[in-house]
Image (tube, rainbow, N blue to C red):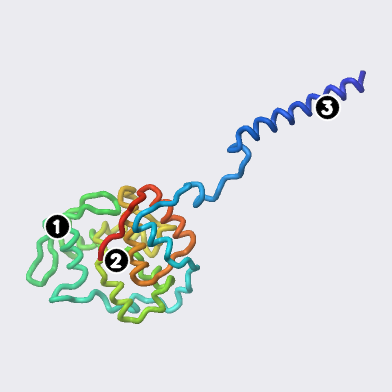
Amino acid sequence: MKRAYQIRRTIAAAVIVVVASIVLYSNPDVWQPAAPASVQTGANPSGQAADALKILAVKGRAPKTGYARAQFGDGWRKKNGCDTRNIILQRDLQDASSNDKCQVTAGTLNDPYTGKTIEFVRGASSSDDVQIDHVVALSDAWQKGAQQLSRERRENLANDPLELLAVDGPANQQKSDGDAATWLPSNKAFRCQYVARQIAVKKKYSLWVTQAEKDAMTRILSSCSGQALPRG
C-alpha cells in the first residue's frame, strides 16, 4: 500500500514538471531574463541627432582634476558692447526690453526645462529667476575631452549660442553638472531637443560620452526618430 502511494506521488510530480515545461516554453517571455534597459527599448532611432550620437566616442570620465570655471574664460565674453548672457536673454525671451548698457531688463521666458512661463525682471533679487545654462555642463565637458582643447577653444565652447539656453534658475541649479544619464528636463516634451543639443555640442567640440550617457540619449531619441540637430 505504501509503495503504491509513493508511485502515485512520483507520477503526479512528473506530470507537474511536464505541464510547467509546456507553459514556460510556449510563453518565452515568462522564463527569458529581462534584457538590459538599453536593449529593452528595441530602439534604433534615426535622424541627424541619432546619426551624430552613433559616431561620438564612448569613454569613461576623465578625472576632474584641474577643473575651474576660469579654464573656460573669465566670465562672459562681450561682443559689440553686449555680453553673452544678455545676447542669449535677448534671443530666448519674448518681448525683451533692454537698457542703454545692452542689459535685458524684462521679458517673458517660456522655459524649456519646466514648461513654465516666467516673467523676467532684472534686479538684485530677481535676475537669477532666469539663468543661462551651459547645456553640456562645463565640468562635464572638462571630464569628457575639453581638457585637451586649447584655452581659446574652451572659451568658444562656453560662449557658443549652441551651448547656451535661458532657463528656469532652480531647474538649472538642480541640473548642476549632470549629463543625460543623471538629469533630464522635467518637461518631457523638450527632452528630445535637449539631448539633440547636447549631441550637437559634443560633436562640434570633439567631446565624448559615457556608455550610460549614450544609452540614456538613445532611449530619449527612440521616442522622436528623425530628430534634427539644432543649428549654432
The circle drawn on residue 194 is none
Q: Secondary structure at mark 2?
A: helix
Residue 209: x %, y % from top left: 44, 65
The circle drawn on residue 107 is 1
Answer with the quarter of the image where residue 68 lies.
bottom left
The disc labelled 3 sits on which kind of residue? Thr
The disc labelled 2 sits on which kind of residue? Glu
- The residue at 28%/79% (across/down) is 74
Residue 60: x %, y % from top left: 50, 68
Disc 1: CA contacts within 10 A as few (<14), some (14-19) or many (>=20): some
| Circle 3 or circle 1, nearest the eye | 3
> What's the CA distance linking mark 2 and mark 1?
21 Å
Residue 126 or residue 112, whichever sits in front: 112
The circle drawn on residue 163 is 2
Residue 150 or residue 187, whichever sits in front: 150
Residue 50: x %, y % from top left: 39, 57
- The residue at 39%/75% (across/down) is 146
Q: Secondary structure at mark 1?
A: strand
